[in-house]
Image (tube, rainbow, N blue to C red):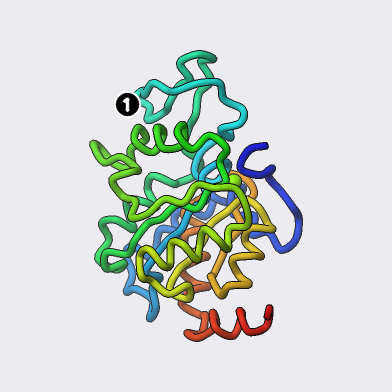
Amino acid sequence: MGDDAPGGGGSAASTGQAADSDTEGAAAPEGRAPPARVPRCFVFDLDNCCWTPEMYQMSSGFSYDGARNVCRSRRGGETVRLLGDVAHVWNTIRTDPAFGGAAIAVASCCDEPAWARELLALFEVSEGIKMQDCIAHTEIRFGNKQTHLRRISEVLKIPLEDMVFFDDQHGHCRNARALGVVSVQVPHGGVTRAAFKQILDEFAQSEPGRARAARAETT
Ligand SMILES: [Mg+2]
């Protein structure tokens, strides 16, 4: 098993397919006045959300092609590439004053954590800036991602209601929402500018205190 199979139905926000045509509009948050509320932490799944293919489909460690910002399995030669606009989105969170130094965290069920960490140390979000340079905390473990999100919240001392979460799986997004974490499913094509805009809009429109309310409903 890898970091979950894609799909899952439900209320998927199918942002990937529309990414190209929506790029101009989706880039707007970087140029406009920031929304009233912005997340303090952006949490990302890895396999099939930030990159493809999933680690269970790979065979060994990786070499890095800096010219193309892709990684290649040393043994099998398979190429791993970033999906959607992941590099741009991460770099925007890192550098745009609108986000005020918001944290980036990883919540993954990847069954090859060492390979995932290797890729995070190779892929760049801008020249010379690796993904791992952007990350405040990484949780890679099996299980319900509520555990990942609670742990990230504890370690970074950021309330769940100030966090947002991307994942390709409907079930993981549903579980995150049950904690009051605004979540956007990216079932195809990874995290795009459109998905980024969507999660910012949903977060800005969400009510503080929803995390406590959501948890109360599920207990
Ligand atoms: Mg995934």
In the shown orientation, is residue 216 left or right of residue 157? right
Q: Nearer the viewer, residue 22 or 4?
A: 4
Comparing 150 with 178, the one in front is: 150
Image coordinates of residue 105 in percent, x first then y, are 41, 55
Q: Please say if 14 is above or below 213.
A: above
Location of the N terminus by quadrant is top right
Q: Which residue corresponds to mark 1?
A: 66
- x and y percent of residue 5 in the render? 69, 42
Amino acid beneath label 1: Gly
Identify the residue shown where x is 58% and y is 42%.
48
User: What's the residue at 37%, 69% (across, down)?
Assistant: 40
Q: Is residue 146 in view from this perspective?
A: yes
Instruction: Name the element at disc 1.
Output: loop
Left or right of residue 68: residue 47: right
The crowding category of the residue bearing disc 1, from other C-alpha atoms within 10 Å (few below 14, some 14 to 19, many at least 20), is few
Residue at the image position 43 percent from the left and 26 percent from the top: 71
Q: Can residue 20 be seen in the rendering of this structure?
A: no
Q: Quadrant of residue 145?
A: bottom right
From the viewer's perspective, tell me whether residue 176 is left or right of residue 218.
left
Q: Is residue 213 above or below residue 194?
A: below
Judge by depth and name the residue closer to the eye, 144 or 43: 144
Q: Residue at x 49, y 44 (%)?
A: 50
